Image: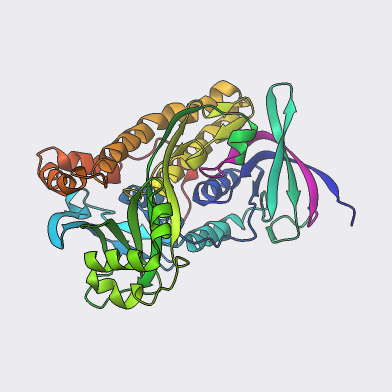
Amino acid sequence: METLKNEVKTDVCIVGAGPAGMLLGLLLAKQGINVIVLEKNADFYREYRGEITQPRFVQMMKQLNLLDYIESQDHVKINEVVVFHDHKEIMQLAFNTLIDEESYCARLTQPTMLAALLEKARHYPNFKLLFNTKVKDLLKDGDKITGVYALRTAGNSTNAEELADEGEFDIRAAVTVAVDGRNSTMEKLADFELDLDYYVNDLLWFSFEKPESWDYNIYHFYFQKNYNYLFLPKLGGLIQCGISLTRGEFQKIKEEGIEAFKSKILEDLPILKPYVEPMEDFKPFVLLLCKMRYVKDWAKDGCLLIGDAAHCVTPWGAVGSTLAMGTAIVAADVLYKGFRTGDLSLETLKQVQARRKDEVKMIQNLQVTLERFLTREPVKKDLAPHIFSICTKLPDITDTYKRLYTREKPLDIDPSFVFAD
């Protein structure tokens, strides 16, 4: 079949339909800006994506008057973090000790959140979402990026009935925003330069049914003999477990075999026996590389990187999606004002990084500090939980937690972004 060639013009082309991309698309569409969102996958369903949102996310959704709508979806509220060493509690952090209102993390599956944002966006005919659409190259006018060349296979779309179901597309836009994750295609195509590329740990995920004795609404962390473990509630009565490994350690584990691995897990946490013992291979596990990255300059003429494409963080603290959505809100404000004044210059696009860099850098620095306690190096791994326990009792630790989990003040954005009830 002959491949179709289509040319489409829009105000903003957003590459990536994750939480930050969909939120940005919704906010811009609300302001009357024409938006096309491109998603390479066929739908929103992927396993083990960041699904814990911080109290600062709850604060941001309340500021936009979207909180009640978001929380009308199926979700779990997490009110505290508890840390154990050899099954003994060494730290308890209740979020209501940090902030009076919005004092919880909200756990939504990403498909649930993205579907909710899409349902809001459907109300705006100037919003278009194309699934099964992969960016293959950039469109340029000299050094200015003027859009993308993309290939679309047959798939779903929203408010895009006038576009071809499949074929090649030249999508021309006043601004192209890359929100396509930590392995950003746009970052590579546009040759953005990294300022930070930090990678020392991995996280191995699997899920199991919640034991009856566990509180479903608590974020658990365990320092144990063989491994460190992170436990999060997962919708559907499940618990999601992350096993902290050093970089490349999983390959050695696989070489030793599943039985040896199971033995170490059950030595650490016998309560997992009904779920781990039946495992016959490594198929239940999904490896996440705990990379932290920071792009030196997030903007080029006609193009802006946000979210993990610009400032990827590790899973520790479960702050990544919240941080990305904060940047999306600021980007929407900058672009809206740029369209209103007719100034979408490189200097305008740079305002996003200027307004977000302090918060992003602060969280990345906190994560580097936290990862020092996750080391499995000999001697250090035995000292780490004791040092962690001492540090959590220091007088200024509450301020550190507040900076990690909450916002001191609302985002400085135009009031027109607030949704009506």
204 lies left or right of 186: left
Q: How many marks?
A: 0
Q: Position of residue 392 (x, y in %)?
A: 14, 45
- The residue under the point 40% across, 64% down is 257
Please tell me which residue lies in front, 50 or 389. Answer: 389
The coloring applied to the image is rainbow
Q: Nearer the viewer, residue 225 or 230?
A: 225
Q: Which quadrant: the C terminus?
A: bottom left
Give above or below for 140 relative to 158. above
Q: Is residue 194 magenta?
A: no
- Percent x, y of residue 174: 68, 32
In the rendered image, residue 94, in percent from the top left (x then y), is placed at: 19, 55
Residue 318 relative to residue 171: left or right: left
Name the residue at 15% across, 60% down.
Answer: 86
Is residue 414 visible in this depiction of the protein?
no
Question: In the rendered image, is residue 175 in sight?
Answer: yes
In the rendered structure, the answer to whether residue 266 lies left or right of residue 172 reads left
Q: Residue at x 37, y 56 (%)?
A: 52
Picture quarter containing residue 171? top right
Q: Which of the two residues, 136 or 14, is positioned nearer the viewer here?
A: 136
Q: In this view, which residue lies farthest toward the right?
A: 2
The magenta stretch spans residue 169:
yes
Image location of residue 122, percent across then percent down: 62, 58
What segment is highlighted magenta in the picture? Answer: 162-184
Image quarter in which the N terminus is found: bottom right
Residue 400 relative to residue 180: left or right: left
